[in-house]
Each structure stands twice: as C-alpha cells, then as structure tokens.
Image (spheres, grey):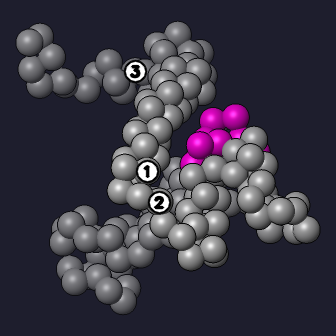
Amino acid sequence: MTTTQPRHGSAGAAKGQLTEMVWDPVTRIVGSLGIYTKIDFAAKTVAECHSTSSVFRGYSIFMKGKDPRDAHFITSRICGICGDNHATCSVYNQNMAYGVAPPHLGEWVINLGEAAEFMFDHNIFQENLVGVDFCEKMVAETNPGVLDLANRTPAPQSEA
C-alpha cells in the first residue's frame, strides 16, 4: 500500500516541504519489500530513502560449513527469478576472498551472461508476476476507481 504524508520543516528540506512516501509491501518478489522515502518535490531532491525486507533469507546461516567454492551453485537456487544475481555475487565474493581476478575477457563473459539473464528475468517478472495487475479486466474487478480515473485522465498525443 502506498501512503504519502507531507512533512513541514524537516531537516534536509531546502524548500521546507518533505513528502513522506511509503510502499510497503512491494509484492511479487520473493520476500516482501518495503521502500520508505522523504522527497522534496519542489527542490527535486530525495532527502531520505531506504528499503527493508521482512523475510529472512538466511544466506549466512545455511552457507555455514559449506565449501565456499559451492556458493554460486547453492545460492543461485534460492530464488526462481534472480538466481543469476546470487551466483554472480557469490563468484565475485570468492574472487575477493581468494585474491583472484578474472581476465578482461572473463569479465565480458560474466557481463554478457548477466545481460542475458536480465532480459530473461525482466520478461518473467513483467509478463508473469506483475503484468496481470495492469490488465484492464483485473483492474476493473479489483480497483474500479483506478480504472475510472485512468479513463478520465487526458493522455496528450494518445491518438498519435
């Protein structure tokens, strides 16, 4: 649920007007996420922003006693969406721990793999997890006020 609350005279607000915005929970991810911000829209600055997760993942616990060289295999299977990110971070951590660095071409291979996974993840997330929330039929059934507002809101150059 998104909430906003104007705050007057808060520290860090150059124009004196901070709007506090909260998105909690952000769903459709593995583990509920909350995002908390304080924004000065007049000055176009973010005074404060942080996120929290209410689901304990336990990486540091279930990796205890495991061979660090297996970390990328184990952590990549924690999430069905972003396994590549966990694997890549594990590999980078191993490289730092062992004091090694891949050759320049190796970095290119890692980056290309990450780019391919990004495209895959984006499609899975957008089309299967979030996309259904934006279809007209779903919004009409679950939040008709939003659909009514969308239908009444002008969309410049929509006929182009």
Q: Which residues are magenta?
A: 78-85
Please state which of the two labelled residues, at mark 1 or mark 3, is closer to the viewer.
Answer: 1
Q: Position of residue 21 (x, y in %)?
A: 45, 61
- Mark 3 lies on residue: 148
Task: Give the quarter of the figure containing the C terminus.
Answer: top left
Dot 1, crowdedness within 10 Å: few (<14), some or many (≥20)?
A: few
Per the model, the C-alpha gap separating discs 3 and 2 is 55 Å
Specify the label residue 36 is tagged with: none
Per the model, the C-alpha gap separating discs 1 and 2 is 5 Å
- Mark 2 lies on residue: 102
- SS for dot 2: loop
Dot 2, crowdedness within 10 Å: few (<14), some or many (≥20)?
A: few
Amino acid on which disc 3 is placed: Asp
Amino acid on which disc 2 is placed: Pro
Disc 1, disc 3: CB below 8 Å? no
Q: Is residue 21 magenta?
A: no
Q: Is residue 81 magenta?
A: yes
Which residue: 44% across, 32% down? 116
Question: Which corner quadrant of the image does residue 23 belong to?
Answer: bottom right
